[in-house]
Image (tube, helix red, strand yellow):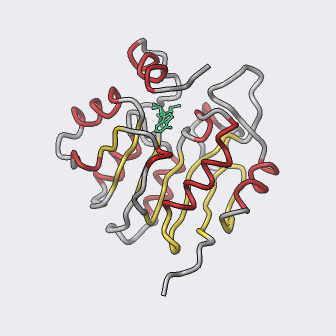
Amino acid sequence: MDFDEQYWTDRYDTGNDRWDIGHVSTPIKEYIDQLTNKDVKILIPGAGNSHEAEYIYNQGFTNIYVCDLSATPLDNLKNRVPHFPQDHLIHGDFFKIEDQFDLVIEQTFFCALDPSFRKQYVDQMSTIIKSTGNLAGLLFGKVFEREGPPFGGLLEDYKVLFSEKFDIKEMSLCTNSIDSRVGNELFINMKSQKPLAY
Ligand SMILES: C[S@@+](CC[C@H](N)C(=O)[O-])C[C@H]1O[C@@H](n2cnc3c(N)ncnc32)[C@H](O)[C@@H]1O
């Protein structure tokens, strides 16, 4: 199946969006709460209804972008948070982004992609994250019985995949998951391995 814009928009339009927890995910909230520099340039790809972006924006972070293939959830964010900068809503394909960010937040986007895109995901993350930047967030740490999305995976395989381009600071069972995801998700925090530009 082609998980294209139409596929995702149909899922939003038919209310078939069980991934949407309706609020910022606790592990991401707690990660954001300990950041002190509110000027960091943040991207949330595959942001969907963007509860994380809404939280981060409302905490006073000034430079946050969201990207989604589907316009529907971006419109929902616009309606909920009218002051969110419109030019920070990227309606398009994550793999085509050419900008650079200090921090990319992962929240049920990696698992939405067909696993054949995983290497491309890591390559694109490495391209768009600055040499001093981080990729942080959540990955499902289990294999699902049903065909995805969501597509799950295992910590050992993720370590091999991401260590090609990132220094993995943390990749471990998440200790502050929301109830419905306890035991199923890993918290990740990785640093770009790109050399610093002189
Ligand atoms: C499972 S949903 C997760 C949404 C959101 N992160 C959340 O937790 O509620 C995956 C999202 O990724 C978006 N998406 C899928 N492929 C994409 C791509 N190549 N570029 C940008 N967004 C994409 C979909 O439209 C959908 O909104």
| Above/below status of 150 relative to 196 | above
**Residue drawn 49% across and 20% down?**
7
Q: Which one is nearer the viewer's eye here, 155 or 122? A: 122
Give the residue at the far right of this rendering. 156
Q: Give residue 77's position: percent from left, percent from top.
A: 29, 36
Toward the top, the furthest residue is 14
* Position in image of residue 122 (x %, y %): 63, 53
Q: In front: 55, or 66?
A: 66
Residue 56, how many percent across, how many down? 36, 53
Q: Quadrant of residue 76?
A: top left
Residue 117 horizontal/vertical position (percent):
64, 40
Q: Quarter of the image holding residue 92?
A: top left
Is residue 133 shown left or right of residue 161? left
Number of on-image labels: 0
Residue farthest toward the bottom in the current orientation of the protein: 198
Residue at left 33%, top 26%?
72
Above or below 14: residue 104: below
Residue depicted at 47% across the width and 39% down the height: 46
Q: Quadrant of the N terminus?
A: top right
Does residue 123 appear left or right of residue 53 in this picture? Answer: right
Seen as rendered, the residue at the extreme left is 83
Q: What residue is drawn where x is 63% and y is 52%?
A: 187
